[in-house]
Amino acid sequence: MSQLTCPRCENSQPLQTARQFRGKSYEAICTRCGQYFFGSLIVISFERTEKDTALEIVYYEWDMLNFTFERLQKGKSGVLQVDWNLLIEGFLVHARNLIRFFSGREHRSDKGDVSTADPEVWARRKLTENEIKTIQAPALLLEDEHFQKISRYLQHCTIYRLTPADWQLEKMHSQIAAILKSFEAAFPRVGKPEMALMAIESDSNSTATLTVGPPIVEV
């Protein structure tokens, strides 16, 4: 086939020719960025990281929570309002998912839920008394404090969104991190963190305190 220039990274080196990639046939794959093509037409794939186990779902939620938190810690300077909104909303969605997983409240096996209410699905055993004390019990308190509020503002359109929320993201992150520490000791991660896979550098020295208002759109 003729040489192509990747429109994504502008790589002009010869591209790998036809092969199977994730179970699909493509005419070319960029040797630099991995984007795949049909001829000269770029194929955009909207996929999140593949997960092989239910446990990977939990750590994916944690990694994405950390990613949004660290980006928010860098401050709003130079960030578009829509991107700032997206970071806040992303943080809250992943926080909500983790809180519900750890608490196990309103678990629905028939709906495919994964939570500490039925750990045999993902851990092949029941929680110990200490795990219930250090993971499930504190998460139930976080449910009472955060879950309904996040749901009202993000799950669907509600009248509550007209009132400023004043999200205490630093406090929320610290609370979830304490539970995650106990969870990780009991159910260790297998594989690299999401942020390592994305090769994103973070500034661990930031000490900014986060108190942010509700997502807004400038007009």
Image (tube, rainbow, N blue to C red):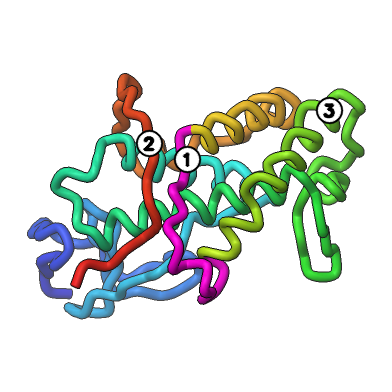
Name the kind of residue labelled 3 in the image.
Lys
Quadrant in the picture for residue 181? top right
How far apart, in angstroms, are the residues tagged by discs 1 and 3? 25 Å
Is 157 magenta? The answer is yes
- Could you say where residue 203 lies in the image, as x and y percent from the top left? 30, 27
Name the kind of residue labelled 2 in the image.
Leu
How far apart, in angstroms, are the residues tagged by discs 2 and 3? 29 Å
- Could you say where residue 116 lies in the image, as x and y percent from the top left? 81, 45
Q: Which mark is residue 133?
A: 3
Name the residue carrying label 1.
168
**Given contact means CB atoms under 8 Å apart, are the residues at marks 1 and 2 in contact?**
yes
Counting residues from the N terminus, which is met first, the one under dot 2 or under dot 3? 3
- Could you say where residue 187 lies in the image, as x and y percent from the top left? 73, 31
Mark 3 neighbour density, 10 Å: few (under 14) some (14–19) many (20 or more): few
Residue range of the region highlighted in magenta in the rendering = 154-170
Q: SS for tag 3?
A: helix
Where 100 sits versus 133, above or below? below
Name the residue carrying label 2.
210
Where 92 sits versus 139, above or below? below
Is 164 magenta? The answer is yes
Name the residue rendered at 20%, 62% in the picture.
15
